[in-house]
Image: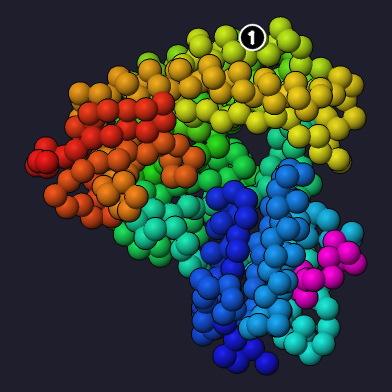
Amino acid sequence: MLQDKKFGMISLGCDKNRVDAERMLDVIRSHGYAVTDDMAEANVLIVNTCAFLEEARAEAIDTVLECDGYRGGALEKLVVSGCLPEKYIGELFPSLTEGDVFLGCSDAEILLDALERSYRGERVNAVGCGREHLSGRVLTTPAHYAYLKIADGCNNFCTYCLIPKIRGRYRSYPIEALVEEAESLGELSELILVAQDVTRYGVDLYGEKSLVRLLRALTAADNIRSVRLLYCYPDAIDGALIEEIANNPKIVKYLDIPLQHSEDDVLKRMNRRGSRAGYLSLLAKLREAVPGIAIRSTFIAGFPAETEEEAAALESFLREAKLTNCGFFAYSREPDTPAYKMKGQIPASVKKRRVRRLYAVQEGISAAYLASWVGKRLRVLCDGIDGERGCFVGRGYFSAPEIDGKVYFRAPQACQGEYYDVLITDTDSYDLFGRTEDYSE
């Protein structure tokens, strides 16, 4: 029944969700089916959803409804997959009647069987009926970089977070399987490791933290030129990991460390194992061991019972910590989390104001950091061409794809995925501008 069908995919949410979508695309391609980027041409449309926040759930539902508008054209079946069905299938299946097939986060391998059932007239709820597909990927990133999800789930149980109830307990993937997957992705200028918490990799599988072992195995692969680490929890960054980052030339000198707040009482209410003093000490250790290391973080403003004094103290922490890049989010009150029932819920207008203030503080810090590069040479990974600006665009080591700033540079020629020494000539509060030595106006 699936003969000659064309598939389309829309994946929402984080880079971990992107990997799940790429695995599902591999199931489709490995069985010989065509995948199209034109949603109007697709006979089967898959919406891979996020459910982390209320805003993400609303986006997922809106996207499904928009896709349903293709019926009457080529569209025959609409598949809803990922986190939203995984967590909310009980209420979703009867209410979201636009969906023909529903799959959870680890059900990629039964996609085609579920569709066959749908084509025979059944509306299919197959959430939790499959097992995770780990044998292949179809990359949706540019060919020179890719994400590698090294684990799923989370054991940290932050009081604001739904991830353990969506994705389950922390589950590491075996080192051998991860190396095999990484080697199958082709020549990569950058491999980006992701998980809800990469620093606890291996504890469940090997009985001890094994991220350093994994890093050594991955960086030994000939097709991988560099490895970047995202989502390192601060309490699990130990001396062995810091030493490996410092001494392994293939590891990008960059860490994404979600701190979420700076004040001890707020961190306790969040169930975060950390303190203001501990965070500052960790930053100092990292900078001493890895000179020039770039550190990115995220913070939540307006967590229940956060006082004006605590909000101001977070601003002062930013000025002291001088982080390279930061993201700030207003606390989202999520049902089925402990924080939902906490006293002292803060009005949306106050949360938004606190977010704006944090961004204003960090903008000055980031701008000063970028300005320090003017007149210096920076090794830049070329990500492609910016048609509007009429120049090449890339990233320095202190920028991860899509979440951090870019480097716009002029050169006689440049190839995607190659590195170039760029003389930085100008900056704004977020991006850098420059040229290669051999470029002339």
Residue 245 picture quarter = top left
Q: In the picture shown, does residue 74 fall above or below 260?
A: below
Residue 11 position, x and y percent, is: 60, 60
Magenta-drawn stretch contains 101: yes
Task: Answer left or right for 428 relative to 36.
Answer: left
Residues rendered magenta in the picture: 92-103
Please say whether residue 31 is one of the residues in the magenta stretch: no
Residue at image position (54%, 83%) is 33
Horizontal and vertical percent position of residue 195: 58, 45
* 65 or 134, nearer to the observer: 65
Residue 185 percent across, percent down from the top left: 40, 62
Q: Badge 1: few (under 14), some or many (20 or more) residues near its Cα, within 10 Å?
A: some
- Secondary structure under badge 1? helix
Q: Is residue 143 above or below residue 147?
A: below
Quadrant of the rendered image containing residue 301: top right
Q: Which residue is mark 1?
A: 313
